[in-house]
Amino acid sequence: MKPVWIIDDDRSIRWVLEKALARENIEFKSFASADEALQAIAKDTPQVVISDIRMPGRSGLELLQTLRERHPSLPIIIMTAYSDLESAVSAFQGGAFEYLSKPFDISHAVELIRRALEQSQRKNASVDDALATPDILGHAPAMQEVFRAIGRLAQSHATVLINGESGAGKELVARALHRHSPRADRVFVAINTAAIPKDLLESELFGHERGAFTGATATRHGRFEQAEGGTLFLDEIGDMPAELQTRLLRVLSDGNFYRVGGHQPIKTNVRIIAATHQNLDERVKLGLFREDLFHRLNVIRLRLPPLRERREDIPLLAKYFLQKNARELGVEQKSLSEAAIQYLMAQDYPGNVRQLENLCHWLTVMTPSQVIEIADLPPEWRGSQTSSAISGEWRSSLAQQVVLALQRGDQHILDNLSRQFEGTLITQALQYTGGRRIEAATLLGIGRNTLTRKIQDLGLDEGRHG
């Protein structure tokens, strides 16, 4: 078997992968740049390539494109520390075998390499070098799965159903699916079926003929005609009235529709992407949604995770929104303190990403200081401080103390901080109970004798607590 080629300008990444492959008895060669690898490939070819995406000189995507032209069946795994949609889609459109975001779990990386070693041929695709602003960001594994799905669907015309809570970014995903599809040069049309009155929705979707009803003074083209050749995004499809579900099913079945008041069928070529925050399977069981329409829409289903399931993305998203708002308003960008970040990561976000985006806009406009603290947050955010938020705040303070101790070169850091931690707990418990040790011990979950011993060991002020 030919070797696995590791290409990364970061020596530590190469070293980690080399050690992991050596343990698995997988032969390898390492290169510090794409140019080095391309020089070597003139004399030798690898079994699998695992390459960074951003390196000095030729990029990983340029390398990917060159290798795909010369060796179209060569499996290539792309690594990147920039966990954004564009990287994922560009990698997949370039024909990458898989996309691996840094920092990665080494066992997962080895598993991907093993799968790639078994790969004999991979469908070829063209590279999209678009450098559009990343509208979907995320390090979280759940978001990486969404990125992968968008990449794999890049050359597809398949109907897609997106499940996700309000504010999670379903329309952003729909736009990304369109932008990275063969229909990208045609129009993207979005309609929220829940926001339009039932009596108007039919005309909005299918248009109407002149004189079809009172007030119809001219022929109107509906959203299907507006989206011809492109993509029609039907948001909150679960709320669509039953009679319109029937009409939509007919369009999906035979590709024809009639304007309201019309008698001539109109042929349509539109890709449908639907979205809902509801459980359509359950609505089908309850008779609220047509089962045959559900199956027509449910060709490919994507689940967009709520923000509370991807808390690690909150700092990344907040920074992006603060940058975006500062740029749009022409002001200096603001940043969040570590305590504020930890506080925001502890919130539940019923409004998801949209709620965080609105908060960042408010902070950009209303906060006088450049570094945003918890006290700078809107009153409704500070007033809703939960136990998890409090936990995040003290953990942040503890982390800062640990860093300071490490920087000072302190010895016995664990013991010293543990004594401070226990002392604070006991002091506060005794203050709360008015010095009653039995009650304080019970609240702390320890015995009275243990409490007495700890008071002595920690040198706490016994006279103060009786």
Image: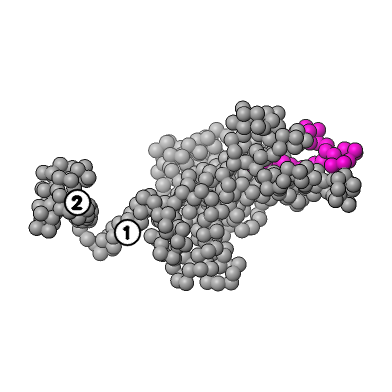
Evaluate whether residue 89 shows in this view: no
Q: Which corner quadrant holds the C terminus?
A: bottom left
Give the residue drawn at x 35%, y 54%. Answer: 390
Picture quadrant of residue 135? bottom right
Figure quadrant of residue 399: bottom left
Q: Which mark is residue 216?
A: none
In the image, residue 121 lies in the stretch drawn in magenta: no
Q: What type is the residue that disc 1 sits on?
A: Ser
Other-residue count near label 1 (Cα within 10 Å), few / some / many at <14 / 14–19 / ≥20: some
Q: Residue 220: where, in percent of width, then height?
A: 85, 49
| Residue at left offset 71%, top offset 37% | 241
Q: To which quarter of the image does residue 409 belong?
A: bottom left
Q: Amino acid at mark 2?
A: Thr
- Residue 417: x %, y % from top left: 22, 55
Depth order, front residue of 393/398: 393
Q: CA distance from mark 2 to mark 1?
A: 26 Å
Q: Which residue is mark 2?
A: 433
Farthest residue in the front direction?
A: 214
How far across and how far down the image is residue 269, in percent? 80, 41
Between residue 211 and residue 105, name the one nearer to us.
Answer: 211
Pick the front one: 140 or 360:
360
Kind of element beneath mark 1: helix
Which residue is tagged 1?
397
| Mark closer to the observer (2, 1) | 2
Q: Dot 2: within a 10 Å radius of its alpha carbon, few (fewer than 14), some, or many (20 or more) residues? A: some
* Marks 2 and 1, the one that precedes in the sequence: 1
Magenta stretch in the rendered image:
249-275
Q: Is residue 119 visible?
A: yes
